Image (cartoon, coloured by chain):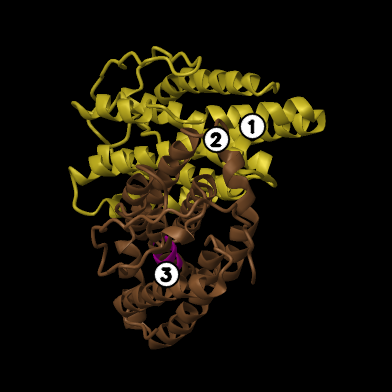
Chain colours: A yellow, B brown
Amino acid sequence: MSVVFGFLRRPKVRIDIPRLRPREDTVYPKVNLAELTPEVLPYLGQAAYVQLAIFEEVSAAIAAAPSVATKQALAPAASQALDKYERLVAEIRRRVDEPAEVIEPFTAGIDRYRAVVKGGDWYEQIASVYLTAGILDDFFTLLAAGLPGDIAPRCVSILDAETGRRALIDVLSEAIAADPVLGSRLALWGRRVVGDTLLVARSAIHLTGNPESDEQRIEPVFTEMIAAHTRRMDQLGLTA
Amino acid sequence: MSVVFGFLRRPKVRIDIPRLRPREDTVYPKVNLAELTPEVLPYLGQAAYVQLAIFEEVSAAIAAAPSVATKQALAPAASQALDKYERLVAEIRRRVDEPAEVIEPFTAGIDRYRAVVKGGDWYEQIASVYLTAGILDDFFTLLAAGLPGDIAPRCVSILDAETGRRALIDVLSEAIAADPVLGSRLALWGRRVVGDTLLVARSAIHLTGNPESDEQRIEPVFTEMIAAHTRRMDQLGLTA
């Protein structure tokens, strides 16, 4: 799958990545991502639509959940994603009147990706949300470092806020502990979705046009994102 | 469709219905509903699940919305319903440790009803949410009057809060104005859903066992609820 967003070039400004409050056991790499960050509006548009997509996927999982207790446990993940979406939309609205116009260009690519990683049943659906949202949150938080001025820390504080996804880990690890067959299926599924998610991340990167230096920047970031993914798989009791 | 929830009898205490802040153009009837109100926990369990159902239906409509602008316009209706659900769950949690156990008995009946009023396409889905949530909000707000002590005003303040559904009216009335055939279809659909919704409301009522006095109490309430439904249909440009 290839999603091409075609970002405008932006002036190359080096900005140190702010130290982030560690979330779960994620340790962010001390690499300079500034040159990879797209323009402010495309960044916000994509980051916002990713959160809206997470909201929609969690909501679908709530609607299909087997019990009220599970629906209730999943509810914070939906409301937190919706809240992040609204806050990113508010950032867009500070700059343009119609935030939807900024977001719309990214829907087709992200919706195609969502269809691919949707999963064949409820557990795959939950695993996809947990694993892909984890990667994309990490990624957009890292990219935020390259945004100009005070937008960077504001976006980091939006994206790095509570995800409400603890319940997804509980639901999954309980089911996996009870059913080894489900465990091996979800382990495969987890390996399956990471590739497509990294492609989406890659498509959001502003390439400088110098493939060698681009790769030098991208590689350690992706290595660290994959390591964080492996830790999330571990949390579920799965081998990445 | 018949949904029987089987409420426990409760002591007959007459409580004046608190005057509600008018919402939209709904005027609540000055009738005494206190004797019709079920026990606190079944009341809260049903009212909570209705809000969770509204959240799920709005979320499904957001996921299927034709544009980001529409998704965004519908988002407040989802977050407000989820917020009401969470606040009702908090009321249940003041009384029992496991709110889900209080809510679970009502899911089957309400889910059957939801399947019936779901609608065949996106516009029917939106119309159903707007019309049925309007009736059920009115109904549970009225019933709240019969709850003992300070639970009554607390539930009224939860249920009578902002619904975020103004966007549903806009989406529907715009589409209806542009397409008379859709208008007649939705007018039929609006008449169709009101009956099933009133059955759900009726099933939540605590009957005293005296059919004559029960009917005397129920009738003016339902008459007023139907009048409010007619006003909502009018807002959409539809004949009820």
Q: Are marks 3 and 1 on the same chain?
A: no
Q: Is B49 in front, or is B213?
A: B213
Magenta-colored segment: predominant secondary structure? helix
Mark 1, residue position: A171
User: Would residue A212 be counted in the magenta stretch?
Assistant: no
Label 2: how many Cα within 10 Å (few below 14, some 14–19, many 20+): some
How many dots with numbers? 3
Left or right: residue B210 versus residue A106 is: right
Left or right: residue B191 versus residue B237 is: right
Q: Is residue A121 visible?
A: yes
Q: Give, as a three-letter code, the residue at label 2.
A: Ala
Q: Spatial distance from mark 3 to mark 2, Cα to Cα?
A: 28 Å
Mark 2, residue position: A73
Q: Which residues are magenta?
A: B131-137
Q: Give, as a three-letter code, the residue at label 1.
A: Val
Q: Are marks 2 and 1 in contact (CB under 8 Å)?
A: yes
Q: Residue at x 18, y 42 (%)?
A: A94
Q: Are marks 3 and 1 in contact (CB under 8 Å)?
A: no
Q: Which mark is residue B131?
A: 3
Q: Spatial distance from mark 2 to mark 1, Cα to Cα?
A: 9 Å
Q: Residue at x 42, y 67 (%)?
A: B135
Indicate the secondary structure of the residue bearing disc 3. Answer: helix
Give the letter of the chain under mark 2.
A
Which of discs 3 and 1 lies nearer the camera? The answer is: 3
Vertical side of A140 occupied by B88: above or below: below
